[in-house]
Image: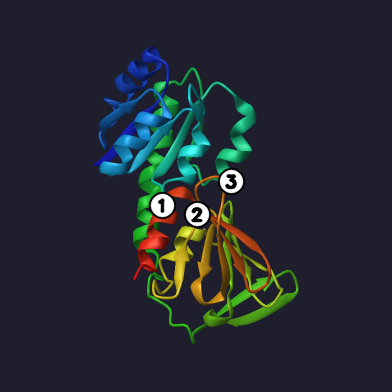
Amino acid sequence: MLRAMIVEDSRLGRLELKSQLANIHNIELVAESENLASARAYLQQHKVDVIFLDINLPDGNGFELLTELMPAPKVIFTTAFEQYALDAFDNNAVDYLMKPITQARLTKACERLSVDDATDKQDPTDELMTMEQRFFVKDGRQCWLIPLAQVERFESLGNYTQVHFDNKHPMLHKTLAQIEKRLPEKHFFRVSRSHVVQLDKVNDVQACSSGGLELTMQSGAKVEVSRRQTSLFKERFAL
């Protein structure tokens, strides 16, 4: 069973989705929220496997919630607006459902959750890498065997990940979540939904007005640490 949460500001919308989810055998609805604030409060204390997430909410945008969740649960967007679809899939959405949502369309989206889980379990590349280990990247006609120690940071670009090393930026056809599972925690840190950095490549740390931190990497690149990850970053380096 997958533990699910609905984040939807319309009471009728929540009731309809709740009724439809009751007909899907592998989904257990454990929480409902009408805004971002209450969703954050619940998710700070509880784990869910999937969020059925509206985009336009009274206190902000649904994408804001995803940037604060590390790692983020699987997400199925439920919205009346088609213009956010590209952004949704850039945020690794499992599906994007347009209201009004039919039972058949919702069932199909939930079937994709099971397919994704099966793929994750069958992935043979879960073994942790060492800093000396090299990995192969082909981008266009160029190829590299890159020692992990050489990588400054990994950046998520939808279903791809950009590898930043030695002023080069090739793309890997893997998600950031897939790569993160293999990285040694002693050396790498997930600073936000879009970035994992190598800690030895951080030159400077500054506080930002958003309440997070800004890292200056050896290349000169600036990378922001999300508010949620800032507290973990400080704990990691506390005396």
Q: Amino acid at mark 1?
A: Met
Q: Residue at x 39, y 55 (%)?
A: 231
Residue 48 visible somewhere in the drawing: no
**Res. 226 mark:** none
Q: Pointer 2: what residue?
A: 192
Q: Residue at x 32, y 35 (%)?
A: 41
Q: Gap between marks 3 and 2, in whole Å?
A: 15 Å
Q: Is residue 222 above or below residue 17?
A: below
Work out which residue is located at the far bottom of the displayed protein and give it: 132
Q: Left or right: 196 with respect to 32?
A: right
The mark nearer the N terminus, 1 or 2, is 1
From the image, which quarter does the C terminus lie in? bottom left
Q: Pointer 3: what residue?
A: 90
Q: Residue at x 40, y 32 (%)?
A: 52
Image spot of residue 64 (x, y percent): 51, 38
* Image quarter of residue 75: top left
Mark 3 residue crowding within 10 angstroms, few (<14) / some (14–19) / many (20+): some
Marks counted in the figure total 3
Q: Amino acid at mark 3?
A: Asp
